[in-house]
Each structure stands twice: as C-alpha cells, then as structure tokens.
Amino acid sequence: MERADLDFANLPFAYVKTDANIRYRFRDGRWDDGELTPDETVSLHMASTCLHYGQEIFEGLKVFERPDGRIQTFRLDENAKRFQHSAGKLLMEPVPVDLFREAVHRVVRANRRFVPPYGSGASLYVRPFLLGAGAEVGVKPSGEYLFLTFVTPVGPYYKAGFQAVKLVVEEEIDRAAPGGVGDVKCGGNYAAGLRATIGAKERGYAEVLYLDAREKRYIDESGSSNFYAIKGDTYVTPTSPSILHSITNKSVRRLARDMGLAVEERPVAVDELGTFDEAGCLGTAAVITPVESITYRGREYVYAEDGQAGPVTARLYERLTAIQWGEAEDPYGWTEIVPEP
Ligand SMILES: *Cc1c(COP(=O)(O)O)cnc(C)c1O
C-alpha cells in the first residue's frame, strides 16, 4: 500500500477528498447492498424530507492505525446504537447495527491509504449519516432513506497538541430552544448553535458552553462536546435532558472510576464554576480537550495556567488515547480490528 501524499502530522480537522464513500438506499421496505463510489455529490429529490423537515442525523467515530499496522475502530457498536436512537426520535428508518459496521469496514478498507500512520497523532474520522430522501410536502416522515458514510483523515479538533482552550457561557442563544432536539445527533441542533459558536470564535473563544434552556442555572455541554470538571478526587459531569450522550464521556467515566476517582453524574450548577480544579471537553473529535478558562457574565474562571492541562486531565487523556491507538491492552472490549478483505 502506498500512503496518500498528505502531511499527516499537521492535518487540520477538515474535509479531505478520499478515494470513495459508501451509500445504501432504503426503498420498498428494504436496504440495498450498498455501493462504493468516488462521487462526492448526492443527488436528491427537491422535496426530500431531509431538506425541508430536518430528517437528517449523523454519527462521528474514529479509526486508528495501531503500532502493528492493523486498523482498529473505537466503540463502533455504541455509535451504531446511538444512530438507531437518533433515527427513532426523528421517525427515520433505523440502520441495523450490522449494516452500520459493514459500511464502516467497507469504506475504511477502500480508503486504506488515507488512514494516518501510527505515531502521526492523526486518525481517520468516519462520518455516517442518514437522509430522508422521499418526496413529501405534507409534514410526515419519508418512506425512503439514504445512508451514506464518508471518511476524512483528521488532526486535532481544537488547538494542536493537547493545548487547553477557552470557553464562554452563552445565555442569549438557546441551542436547545423549542424545536431543538435533545439527545439526537442531528444537523438541526448544529444549525441552531452555529450563530453562537461563530460569535464565540470571533471573540477569541474556542466554543460556547451552554446552560440549561429553562432556568439558565445548570451547565449543559459545549457546542459539539460534553463537559466535565475535576473537583479534588471527583470527576463531575452534567446530566440534562438536552445534551447528547457522548461515548467519549461514557468511556472516560469508566476510566476515571478504574483510576480510583469518584464519578458524579448530576446537574452541575453554573455557580460551581469557581470550585473546579480542572475542566475539559469530551468528544470523538475533541478527544479530551483541557479547558483553560470559562468566561461567565464577564468573569473569567481559570483552570489551566498557560494552556497546560491539569494532572488528572493529563492522566485520563493518556489512558484513553493509549487504548484508542492500540498501545495499551483494551480490557473493556472497546476496540475491534477492521478485518482484511
Ligand atoms: C457528537 C457530539 C458529542 C460528543 O459525542 P461522542 O460520542 O463523544 O463523539 C457531544 N455533544 C454533541 C452535541 C455532539 O454532537
């Protein structure tokens, strides 16, 4: 295999054209066999429900080249199950878990030369998504669906090299406003949050930290990742009906427990900002990104001086990434080798 001609060690988090994507269509009550294609465009009926009524959901997972050269997925079954959960919430046809796995394996194998080499710090990001593709004008679910998956080699989502980022609490814009959908990974939530995210970036912050929409008293999550704080020997992460259940957060909670930390899943009041020793963002793209500071009502609460992660955050990051990269043994069964054809 000749590797794609890319500067893998310095990749941004951005779309790169690869050799193929894979597409399956659900029609007349069944999924077809799927097709790999180099075509980067999608042809849709102009009355498709994804275009008018937001019948669109997606997933994001990463695959990694291990030190032994094999490729492994990380918690693929969790992404597949969440994809089904999201589909159910928006009355879309769920993709069977086995079909989801097959799609990821086929598209990763077809793009083997784009998998970043072990040690580069980059990985292959996999983006499955589901579109309501039937023509409807009345408000009703589609009878036809497109399930597509593309891949793109990516570097860090925020700053390169485990650098801490600044967040700002946004109270004016509700991502979880009426019409938003809690706990569904869908474009609609991102559309609702885009204005806040771009506004925060223009003011020098990496992302927004949202509060609960009803009372503005509790921390929800940041635009595209879950939130945690470290208080002494305790890992604290918010529960809320309007946050997405992050698979990274679920994994890190387990690692934290196994390292002897207490784990609290509960509403986390914004009044607690002054009591955190460390804080971080959690997501497939963000991995664990340390939070340097959070600005709330004009006051900046600092958790990482000079952008350096605190000791607990650093330990959690080391443990998680060692498993993802295949450097450490995986006692949890989270990783799976992508089979050779
Ligand atoms: C994808 C996503 C996350 C992170 O979830 P992971 O499963 O860890 O990737 C968090 N919040 C939102 C809104 C997301 O879309």
Image (spheres, grey):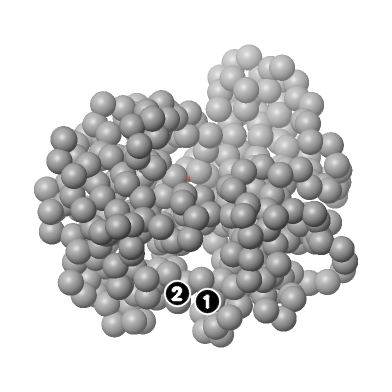
Q: Which residue is drawn at 30% across and 72% down?
A: 312
Mark 1, secondary structure of its residue: helix
Rendered location of residue 70, percent (x, y): 74, 75
Q: Check whether the beta carbons of the residues at disc 2 and disc 1 lie within 8 A of each other.
A: yes
Q: Say which residue label 1 marks.
A: 322
Mark 2, secondary structure of its residue: helix
- Given residues 8 and 306, the one toward you in this image is 306
For residue 318, the mark is 2
Above or below, comparing residue 35 to residue 171 in the picture: below
Viewport quadrant of the C terminus: bottom right
Q: Please, what is the three-letter code of the amino acid marked with disc 1?
A: Ala
Rendered location of residue 134, percent (x, y): 71, 26
Q: Can residue 330 be spotted in the picture?
A: yes
User: Seen in the image, is 90 located left or right of residue 10?
Assistant: left
Label 2 environment density (alpha carbons within 10 Å; few <14, some 14–19, many ≥20): few
Rendered location of residue 294, percent (x, y): 24, 46
- Given residues 2 and 137, the one toward you in this image is 2
